[in-house]
Image (cartoon, grey):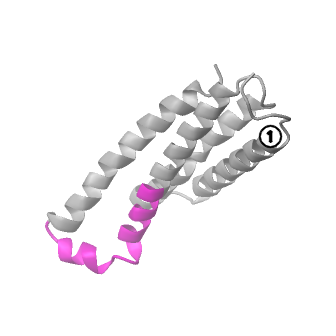
Amino acid sequence: MTGKNNLSAGFLFMGMFMVYGFLLIYLRDFAPGKEEWIAQYTTGKHFESRLAHVHGNLFAFLNIVIGYLLVYFNDRIRNMKTISWLALAGMLMPLGILAEIYFGASPIFVLIGAIAMTTAVIWLGVSFYSMRKISPS
């Protein structure tokens, strides 16, 4: 069933980035050297890690919404599998940010994820716009 993987991955991804949020709270409030971490609020790893946290939860939520809509409107949306896979690939963006922070990886995954999620959202929007009626089949 197209959309089921988006629902599952979305909830799991959201849970993972919620846990990551607890790590960020620890680093800000309790970790040794927290003053240095706080001083880098708008720059460096602190800023990038907050970007990953926010985008991770946003893209997880988008996958939940997209997954639900793909399940609910199952045979009325063309190219459902492509939209589903693009939304899943979109989660490369926040993972790419984390890979940059912790492993010095190239930003290519950030770009691929951003382009994939943007494409999925626009494609789904166009699909809904072109439907005759919005009621389920």
At 30% from the left edge and 46% from the top edge, which residue is drawn?
19
Q: In which quadrant will I find the C terminus?
A: top right
Predominant secondary structure, magenta span: helix
In magenta segment, residue 52: yes
Q: Decide: few, some or many residues near mark 1? Use Cα within 10 Å; few <14, some 14-19, many ≥20.
A: some
Q: Which residue is mark 1?
A: 127
In magenta segment, residue 3: no
At 70% from the left edge and 24% from the top edge, which residue is drawn?
74
Q: Position of residue 26 (x, y in %)?
A: 20, 59
In front of the other: 109 or 105: 109
Q: Position of residue 130 (x, y in %)?
A: 85, 41
At 65% from the left edge and 49% from the top edge, which residue is drawn?
117
Q: Position of residue 43 (x, y in %)?
A: 40, 77
At 41% from the left edge and 56% from the top edge, which residue is drawn?
53
In front of the other: 97 or 16: 16
Left or right relative to 114: residue 95? left
| In the image, residue 12 above or below residue 98 | above
Identify the residue at the far top of this view.
1
Residue 81 visible in the snapshot: yes
Magenta-drawn segment: 32-54
Across the whole image, how many numbered discs are drawn on residues? 1
In front of the other: 70 or 79: 70
Q: Position of residue 113 (x, y in %)?
A: 62, 50
| In the image, residue 36 above or below residue 77 | below
Can you tell which quarter of the image residue 102 is in?
A: bottom left
Can you tell which quarter of the image residue 77 is in?
A: top right
Residue 88 visible in the snapshot: no
